[in-house]
Amino acid sequence: MNFLKIAIFFIGITTFAQGKVGAVDVDYILSKMPEMITVQTQLQTYGQQLDTDLNKKIDEYKKLAEEYKKGEATFTPVEKKEKQTALVNLDTDIQKFQENGAKLMDIKQKEYLQPLYKKIGEALNKVAKAQNYTQVMQTNTDLVYLDPNYDLTVPILTELGITITVEEEGK
């Protein structure tokens, strides 16, 4: 039984040793894609629309609060209660809208970036298969060292038709 475990262990090591592992900096590729200008413009426009909607709600709240202050003395208890409820509901709506603003922006960003990630994925598949890579990891802050020979970022940029200067290659 122990012999079988040892044999499987060595087969696993041999299989892993035959694999070729590369890395790619997806964020860098995204930053070099010309489509990012459109994405940033779309996000900025969406953000401005959210701000406009928020400002409308705030203006409506201010208007209701002003009307309430002016007429508070003349309101019946039922009218006071209705107007107070309307103010509280609008205030709650404003708070929820503010809390959800960042989430809405994140959702929109993912929606706009999805086609770009798809393009990068297709280019990555072509490059990885052409260069016989069995695994490709994404570079991040945890990566301490990467041999430039195993960095697929530049070949993927080339596959996407994006040219970078020699200075930019060193990132």
Image (cartoon, helix red, strand yellow):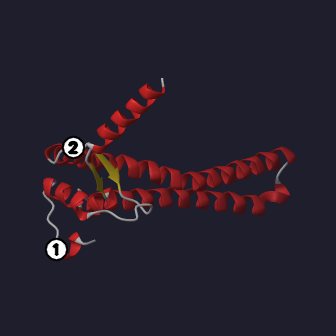
Q: Residue at x 34, y 34 (%)?
A: 11
In front here: 28 or 109? Answer: 28
Q: Residue at x 62, y 50 (%)?
A: 96
Q: Residue at x 83, y 56 (%)?
A: 74
As drawn, the label of residue 125 is: 2
Q: Is residue 61 left or right of residue 166?
A: right
54 in relation to 21, above or below: below
Q: Quadrant of the C terminus?
A: bottom left
- Tag 1: amino acid: Val
Could you tell me if residue 34 is visible in this image?
no
Q: Position of residue 111 (x, y in %)?
A: 37, 46
Instruction: Give me the C-alpha separation between circle 1 and circle 2.
Output: 24 Å
Considering the numbered disc 2 on the image, is that residue within a helix, a strand or a loop? helix
Q: Is residue 94 left or right of residue 32?
A: right
Do labels 1 and 2 touch, CB within 8 Å?
no
The tag earlier along the polypeptide, 1 or 2, is 2
132 in relation to 60, above or below: above
Res 70 quadrant in image: bottom right
Q: Which residue is mark 1?
A: 166
> Residue lying furthest bottom in this view?
167
Considering the numbered disc 1 on the image, is that residue within a helix, a strand or a loop? helix
In front here: 36 or 146? Answer: 146
Q: Position of residue 46 (x, y in %)?
A: 40, 56
- Tag 2: amino acid: Asn
Q: Residue at x 16, y 74 (%)?
A: 166
Could you tell me if residue 53 is visible in this image?
yes
> Residue lying furthest top in this view?
1
Q: Position of residue 141 (x, y in %)?
A: 43, 63
Counting labels gives 2
